[in-house]
Image (spheres, rainbow, N blue to C red):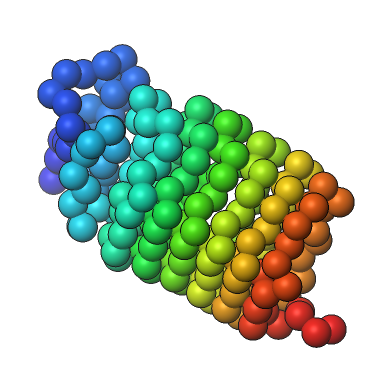
């Protein structure tokens, strides 16, 4: 059986970047969503690409999208808002390192994303706010970037699979509870 993949967007007009998404697939159709400014996000979405016109992923943009497993960011993303991906329990793929303009990961942005296993920060990240990755119990590997300056309270609290982390020398402020309840703390 063949299906044509469809897009959901806040705008009706096509742009050149979107033409690649009008493909025919054999078998299951991925639930794909092209996020544009002001778009309403269906809770059933599984894959998201943030449109290049979006500079900051808004606060609470994808809260509770339990089936969302993959997010594509573009290089121009500057920030990820508060609770942007909060409780997206299936989220396992997000390549932050490609978001070369990303400066801040806001509070609770990825809190309770319990399927995340690894995160690699782009060189542009300066601040990881409180509880940004709190409760990500499957998170095993985190690569922090040189240039990171601030790690706020409980940023990685409850990451019970995180066994070690290297803090770059560029960090000038790190809350004492940044890694609360992580296995390596206290060793």
Taking the spot 61% from the left edge, 80% from the top edge, the residue there is: 160
Left or right of 72, for residue 8: left
174 relative to 72 in the view: left or right:
right
Total numbered labels: 0
Could you say which is closer to the camera, residue 144 or residue 71?
144
Give residue 140's position: percent from left, percent from top.
64, 69
Q: Quick check: 58 left or right of 117?
A: left
Residue displayed at 70% across by 38% down? 123
Task: Give whichever of 17, 30 is nearer the camera.
Answer: 17
Q: Is 21 displayed left or right of 59 in the figure?
A: left
Q: Residue furthest top?
A: 16
Q: Residue at x 44, y 70 (%)?
A: 112
Expressed as whole percent of the image width and height from the top left, the position of residue 62 reads: 31, 54
* Residue 57 shows in the view: yes
Q: Quadrant of the rendered structure where residue 181 is?
A: bottom right
Across and down, in percent, residue 24 comes to: 21, 33
Placement of the C terminus among the 4 image quadrants: bottom right
Res. 115 visible in picture: no
Where residue 70 sits: x, y (%)? 40, 51
State the quadrant of the N terminus.
Answer: top left
Q: Is residue 81 above or below residue 136?
A: above
User: Residue at position x 26%, y 41% from top?
Assistant: 33
């Amino acid at each position: 059986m063949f299906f044509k993949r469809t897009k959901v967007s806040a705008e009706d007009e096509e742009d050149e970047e979107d033409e690649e998404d009008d493909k025919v697939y054999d078998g299951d159709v991925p639930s794909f969503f092209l996020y544009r400014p002001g778009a309403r996000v269906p809770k059933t979405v599984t894959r998201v690409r943030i449109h290049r016109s979006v500079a900051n992923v808004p606060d609470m943009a994808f809260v509770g999208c339990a089936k969302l497993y993959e997010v594509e960011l573009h290089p121009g993303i500057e920030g990820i808002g508060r609770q942007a991906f909060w409780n997206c329990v299936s989220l396992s793929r997000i390549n932050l390192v490609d978001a070369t303009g990303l400066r801040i990961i806001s509070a609770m942005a990825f809190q309770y994303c319990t399927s995340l296993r690894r995160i690699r920060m782009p060189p542009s990240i300066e601040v990881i706010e409180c509880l940004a990755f709190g409760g990500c119990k499957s998170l095993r590997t985190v690569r922090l970037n040189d240039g990171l300056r601030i790690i706020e309270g409980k940023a990685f609290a409850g990451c019970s699979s995180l066994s070690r982390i290297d803090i770059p020398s560029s960090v000038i402020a790190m809350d004492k509870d940044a890694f609360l309840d992580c296995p390596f703390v206290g060793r």
